[in-house]
Structures are given as C-alpha cells and as structure tokens.
Image (cartoon, grey):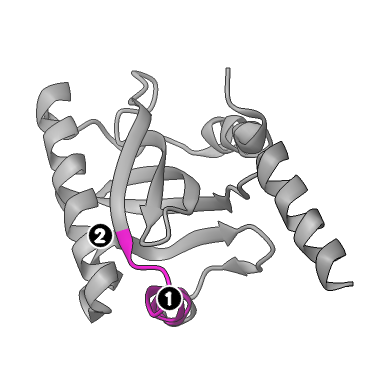
Amino acid sequence: MLPKILWPWGVFLGFSMSCLAATGAISTSPREIQAELDERNTQWMGDFNSGSQALQDHYLEGALRLAEKGPFLENAAERLRDWTTRQKTEAIQALHTSYRIRLQENPDRVYEAGYFLDANQARTHYLWVWAIDGGRWRREIELLTREVPVASEEAERDRIDEARRKW
C-alpha cells in the first residue's frame, strides 16, 4: 500500500502503465538492471548537485515531469532550468529507492518509487518511469511531492508559548 502522500501518484502510475506500449524486450537480467538504475541514480544525484548540463542525459526527449504545486514540464530546457533553480537551495544528500518493478508485459519500462533528502533533511518522494533508449535507461515520467514535516506537539506548544511571551 502506498503512503497517503503518494496515493494520487499511484493512481496516475496505474493509468500510465495501462497507456504505455511495449516497444521491444531487452536482454538484460534483473540484477543488471538494478545495478544500472542504481548507478544512473547516483550519476543523476551528482549531476544535480553540480548543476551540470549532463542532467539532460538522464531523460528521454519529451520526458514528462510533474512536481507538486508546479506545471507539467515536457520541455528539456524548462526541466533543466527548474532543477538548476532547485539545486541552488536543495542539494541532495541521499536517495533511497523504496520500490522498483519491471513488468513482463512491458519489459522496456521500470517503475521506481522512493525519496531523496536535501541538505536540510527535507524529504521529496518520487515516482519515476524509466524507459530503455539506445541501450540506456532514461526517465520518461517523473512525479515529485515534497513531504511537509509535522511539528511535534511539544515543539508546537513551545512555538505558541514563545509567541505569547512576545505578545
């Protein structure tokens, strides 16, 4: 079961999976695919943190990106501009893959869900659809939602008490 924060994306993924057509199988073992996607994620994180133009290489031409409270981005230049803007304030410290699946009915796609943490330990959940392109895995769909930390009851009480003292 997907966490509540990812549930709307799960519905979208289910719809996307039914709409995407297989374009041919690839002859790579599941273990090799896992290793390659882990490597691609590590490269993406490095390219993101350095603000590198190589970030474009991780996406298919016309890849779709939807971030919470943002527009759909289908244009590579817009996507790069958005990531570059985010990189200035949100360097990624860690990336954790929670779930990854490759369906037999559509072997040239891999569906991956997880989260990454920025320098402030803010968590961004992601849902990526990887597609094989020219022998390399690239992102075709990218959905992002930021987890808003809920203050503890004690921290909230302290904040209110401080506001009362000032008042």
Looking at the rendered structure, the secondary structure element under dot 1 is loop
Residue that mark 2 sits on: 45
| Residue 72 on image: x %, y % | 62, 65
Image-quadrant location for residue 32: top left
Image-quadrant location for residue 161: bottom right
Report, in whole angstroms, how far the alpha carbon at label 1 lies from the one at label 2. 14 Å
- State which tag comes first along the sequence, 1 or 2: 2
* Residue numbers of the magenta segment: 79-92
Label 1: few (<14), some (14–19) or many (≥20) C-alpha neighbours in 10 Å: few
Considering only vertical position in the picture, is 145 above or below 7? below
- Secondary structure character of the magenta stretch overall: helix
Residue that mark 1 sits on: 89
Q: Amino acid at mark 2?
A: Met
Do the residues bearing badges 1 and 2 touch, measured as CB atoms within 8 Å? no
Residue 136 visible to the viewer: no
| Residue 114 on image: x %, y % | 41, 37
Q: Residue at x 23, y 79 (%)?
A: 52
Looking at the rendered structure, the secondary structure element under dot 2 is helix
Position of the C terminus by quadrant:
bottom right
Residue 26 visible to the viewer: yes
Considering only vertical position in the picture, is 5 above or below 86? above
